[in-house]
Amino acid sequence: MTKKLLALNRGEIAIRIFRAANELGLRTVAIYSQEDRLSLHRFKADEAYLTGAGLGPVQAYLDIPGIIALAREKQVDLIHPGYGFLSENPALARACAAAGITFVGPDARILEDLGDKTAARRLAQQAGVPVLPGTGHPVETLEEARQIAPQIGFPLILKAAFGGGGRGMRVVLKPAELEARFAEATAEAKAAFGNGAVFLERYIRRARHVEVQLLGDRHGHLLHLHERDCSV
């Protein structure tokens, strides 16, 4: 029987997942919010279902219990989160495992270590990788941010602790900007990832964002994809 793969994402991210799934002979399943009912990704899949009715255009894709229930009802075998939304949320990986659905991504333990960017910073430091001055734990309140900021120095950058893709990031050039930038960053992180915690880090002007990418699977295969310049 052909296996079903659900893309827990929208737009071009979901479409790219469907393309790869089609090349592997998998049947594809799209989910869409009410606001995305005319989005192209809905029509690129073999099956498509409304999710998160009444939750809003972003929260619809963060509803783990609802999405897992739909996946079980439609006999989905695999869930691919793409990037953003729940892709770095260990709760989704655990929910998939509990439902007998394969999560296309790292297991929950790894996501707990690396999905929290402050935990990832600590792992990097333990491995001897140099990191910028910053907080070693998620910061949830403005008062704590105000206490820590002078120790890091300005300019600094606020980053979402539990997500990526540039969401929940704000540069703070001077102390007077901290309150407004903190409110913006935490609100955006909360809307995008379901958790508004951020961390503070020294900001480097005109920096290059270079990633070293590795891809491994549960069978022990490991590929080094070399460096990638992700600078905007």
Image (cartoon, helix red, strand yellow):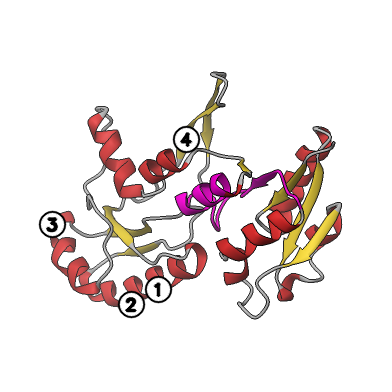
Q: Check whether the beta carbons of the residues at disc 3 and disc 4 lie within 8 A of each other.
A: no
Can residue 190 be seen at all in this image of the molecule?
yes
- Calculate the distance from the C-alpha at mark 1 to the C-alpha at mark 4: 26 Å
Q: Check whether the beta carbons of the residues at disc 4 and disc 2 lie within 8 A of each other.
A: no
Looking at the picture, which amino acid does disc 2 mark? Ala
Of the two numbered discs 3 and 2 on the same chain, state the one appearing first in sequence: 3
In the picture provided, is 134 more to the left or to the right than 214? left
Can residue 232 be seen at all in this image of the molecule?
no
Looking at the picture, which amino acid does disc 1 mark? Glu
- Determine which residue is flagged by label 2: 180
Q: Assess disc 2: are there few (<14), some (14-19) or many (≥20) residues with their C-alpha within 10 Å of its C-alpha.
A: few
Residue 179 position within the rendered picture, expressed as x and y whole percent measured from the top left? 28, 76
- Determine which residue is flagged by label 1: 184
Mark 4, secondary structure of its residue: strand
Q: Check whether the beta carbons of the residues at disc 2 and disc 1 lie within 8 A of each other.
A: yes
In this view, the residue in front, 200 or 111, is 111
Quarter of the image where the N terminus is located: top right
What label does residue 211 carry, if any? Answer: 4
Residue 40 position within the rendered picture, expressed as x and y whole percent measured from the top left? 82, 61
Mark 2, secondary structure of its residue: helix
Would residue 95 be counted in the magenta stretch?
A: yes
The magenta segment: 75-98
Of the two numbered discs 1 and 4 on the same chain, state the one appearing first in sequence: 1
- Residue 218 versus residue 207 in the image, above or below: above
Residue 91 position within the rendered picture, expressed as x and y whole percent measured from the top left? 47, 53
- Calculate the distance from the C-alpha at mark 3 to the C-alpha at mark 4: 28 Å
Of the two numbered discs 3 and 1 on the same chain, state the one appearing first in sequence: 3
In the picture provided, is 56 more to the left or to the right than 115? right
In the picture provided, is 52 more to the left or to the right than 189? right
In terms of image quadrants, where is residue 139? bottom left
Looking at the picture, which amino acid does disc 3 mark? Gln
Residue at figure coordinates x 69%, y 68% from the top left: 51
